[in-house]
Amino acid sequence: MKGKRKGTQREKGQSLAEFAIVLPFLLVILAGVLDLGRLYYVSVSISDAAAEGAAYAAINPDDVTEIIARAQAASTGLVQVQSDMVEVDCPVVASGQPVTVTVHYDFVVATPVLNAIVADGILPLHAIATEVILKGDL
């Protein structure tokens, strides 16, 4: 009987040692998954901001300040789009012509392993949305 108890204690110690060795790898994997989730969230947010700006630009292509304001208003929560991150391109202001809104965002990687892979720990993201001007000839 005593032999079984000693063996059980040794197995518990071995399990604890294995867990201590594996834990850092599990934490790095978990942090990487969280970082990828943040990346997806930011990608969706700036895509929504660009789409909102383009939708407004389809109706009012001349009002660049309001186009930028609409794109900024669409980004709330963790992602804040500044006015210098939004670019409006409308070569010809006429019905049926395209208007493009681009949102640039620098995503800062938090995971040390991904930070080493990405240059300077910053991943530049771009979201582009294009709509057709709906108004009559301006």
Image (cartoon, helix red, strand yellow):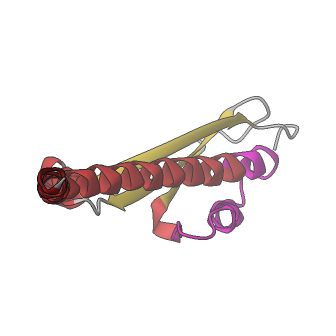
| Residue 115 at least partly seen | no
Up the image or down, 20 lies above or below 47; here it is below
Task: Judge by depth and name the residue closer to the eye, 39 or 47.
Answer: 39
Up the image or down, 83 lies above or below 132; here it is below
Task: Judge by depth and name the residue closer to the eye, 53 or 32.
Answer: 32
Residue 62: within the magenta?
Answer: yes
The image quadrant of residue 13 is bottom left
- 52 sits to left or right of 80: right
Total number of numbered labels? 0
* x 36%, y 58%: residue: 107
Task: Judge by depth and name the residue closer to the eye, 54 or 43.
Answer: 43
| Residue 119 at least partly seen | yes
Q: Where is residue 77 drawn, in percent x and y?
A: 60, 70
- 95 sits to left or right of 114: right
- 22 sits to left or right of 33: left
Q: Which residues are magenta?
A: 54-82
Up the image or down, 32 lies above or below 85; here it is above
Q: Where is residue 66 drawn, in percent x and y?
A: 71, 66
Q: Where is residue 4 drawn, in percent x and y?
A: 17, 50
